[in-house]
Image: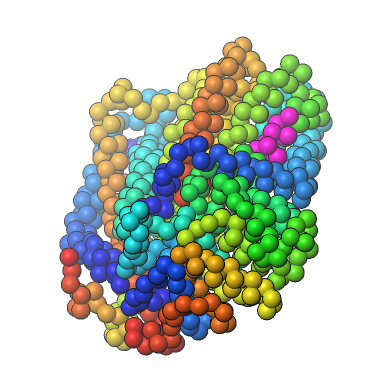
Amino acid sequence: MDFSAPHMGFVISSYAITFVVLGALALWIFARARSVTRRLKQLDDEGARRRPTSGQVET
Amino acid sequence: MVFAGLDFTAHAGRMLVLRGPNGAGKTSLLRLIAGLADPAGGTLAVEEPSLPADALLGEHVHFIAHQDAIKLHLSVAENLNFWSSFFGGGDVTGAMTAMNLAALAEFQAQRLSAGQKRRLGLARLALVEKPVWLLDEPTVGLDTASQALLADMMTRHLDGGGIIIASTHIDLPVKSSDVLDFATLGERAG
Amino acid sequence: MYWILPRLANGPVEMMPAFKSVVARDFTLAIRQGGSIGTAIGFFLTVIVLLPLGLGPDQQLLQRIAPGALWIALLLSVLLSADRLYQTDHDDGSLEIMALSSTPLEVVVLAKASVHWLTSGLPLAIAAPVFGFLLNLDTALIVPLGIAMVTGSVALSLLASLGAAITVGLRQGGLLVSLLVLPLYVPVMIFGVLASSGAQSGIDNSATALIILVAIVLAALVVTPFASAAALRSYMR
Amino acid sequence: MSSIERFANPTRFMRLQTTVQPWVWIITLALFGVGLFLGLTRAPADYQQGETVRIMYVHVPAAWSALMVYTVMAVASIIGIVFRHPLADIAAKAAAPIGAAFCFLALATGSLWGKPMWGTWWVWDARLTSMFVLLLLYLGYMAIWQAIDDPRRASRIAAIVAIVGFINVPIVKFSVDWWYSLHQPASVFRTDGPTIHPSILTPLLIMGLAYSFLFLALHLIAIRSEIGTRRIRQTELARTGALQ
């Protein structure tokens, strides 16, 4: 790859925006997963939730 | 959704009265029977030889909900005429007589009082014959005379072998009724 | 599953009275409540007036954009007039009573969409070529534009009624309807404009475009009643 | 209560997801590594476009994935509507933001590609226009989930929106192609077709696979979160019910 080629800025910008958007998407999804896991654990600790694995039979 | 452990039977020629505090699920149960809601579990069975047991009551049901399903810009007669032709023919004159609406026939529905609107909504019961009536607080807004008209209509329906399931706070002068009380039931379901 | 599929217990013969009764009732209501046709045409005219004000009074430019501008005005008017198509029937309980009958809700949907077309799409499609004079519309295009609009507005009404059904239980439906329905309007508008623009760069594709427009209308006739009825049923339970 | 049936499959999904997830990530990263390496160092620069052609390796896979995700969403919606499978509804809902991000990227990189090629940031090119409509479909679908509180009702309405939108996509593509060919007959450049040299096609296909696996990785996590959210919602509802 030739970094001195014309329009190189557009190529770099394309890869940068792809990286930023996909990274932000992944971070958002991770953050959501973490907060959901934390809340579920909190509810479990309070004993508010019947675990689907304990009392009930799975098919 | 709101109740568990319900078990009841509604018999031909008898009325089943639903009682219970607000929010007990009387309306939800009526909607469930009508097929306007999905049960989270449990079954509803129809014991009628001409119908499959899992038949949806849907078209065999008159459902009187909180709303009267009337168009304010149509006259009383036009409202009834619409439902009559929608259901493929009905007795408009008879329906107006049954709920004492004949004198109001040409009135625009928006000029009716709340009680008169309720009567117009109830007149649908006499418009087309359907075996099952589901009435959600049918007496709301009715004066004593109109309540008597409604009771007459219900008695005639029961005498003809029909079924009524009604939620009501008022004891209507209708014979042969069973009571399903949500208050005692809630404890059992607890 | 049954909430998506209509109950097909009865033949089409028994559905006609119900269809006719809904058409007659809604038509009476539209006439009696008044304003609905007038408002739609008034809105249409407003859009037409705003265009030259925004673009400048260049007669040639206006002539060039006239068919497209009229189509945009048409689809916005149709869309906005359909916004509350099912609202009163939903709020006053009529829709539930209609659902509790042997008539499939799809028939009710078709009836209501037909009345909407009769009271907004059709009068607008007839009026649009006349209003075209305000945009210096080529007189040779009046007839093809009218034909394309009368045809295309059927699809516009059906799709708008689908948007109205999808948002019937929501408090602020208006903007959401636009977001949902405008992408569906893209093909109708493209072929509508092509069918009403006559020859472009020497090639006249308007006949082909009109045929495709008819095909889109037929597709909308098949899909939207089922989709609208399924949406209405979901809001009832 | 039928909560046993309702959660049996999501529970099985959760267990499967836990085992599969690391492998999906490994494959995703490997594919991105190989794809970027080949695309940026091994593939030749275009004799006309120069290095700009390398935008293709992020633009085209984004557009492919945006279409693929919408297809996944529509198929999940059909399964949800026909078989009433709650996991299908959840899968459809979880896919939408990822698809919308791909769609946005296809538009953004397309615009960045267009500037040096056409001299403007935005051209109403047939492909970009269809992508734009697809983005609107994604936004409408997500707006429906936002607007309806009851998840059961929302899933039905959203499924109708997704399916109707899915029927609409090819019609839009067809109409926009027609419209574009009439207004500007000559195509500026072509990235599709079998004429592409393998040294370009290979990295392109690998990047396409990389995007697909990235979607799979993120989708699995998003589904898990959505199942968790519904359990939280149900637990909290049950709790307020118990307080009454």
- Residue drawn where x is 39% and y is 57% of the image: B56
Q: Is residue D20 above or below residue D174?
A: below
Between residues D240 and B30, which one lies in front from this camera angle?
B30
Residue B173 occupies quadrant: bottom right
Q: Is residue B37 above or below residue B180?
A: above
Residue C90 occupies quadrant: bottom right
Between residues B171 and D127, which one lies in front from this camera angle?
B171
Quarter of the picture containing the N terminus of chain D is: bottom left
- Residue drawn where x is 42% and y is 58% of the image: B57
- Residue drawn where x is 64% and y is 15% of the image: C199
Percent across and percent down for residue D204 are 30, 36
Judged left or right of residue B129, residue D60 is: left
Q: Main secondary structure of the magenta part?
A: helix
Which region is colored magenta? C116-126
Between residues C53 and D159, which one lies in front from this camera angle?
D159
Quarter of the picture containing the C terminus of chain D is: bottom left
Judged left or right of residue C59, residue B33 is: left
Q: Is residue C41 magenta?
A: no
Between residues C189 and D241, which one lies in front from this camera angle?
D241
Percent across and percent down for residue C205 are 57, 16
- Residue drawn where x is 38% and y is 29% of the image: D191
Q: Is residue B111 above or below residue D205?
A: below
Judged left or right of residue B74, residue B19 is: left
Q: Which residue lies most toward the front here?
A: B159
Percent across and percent down for residue D144 are 50, 56
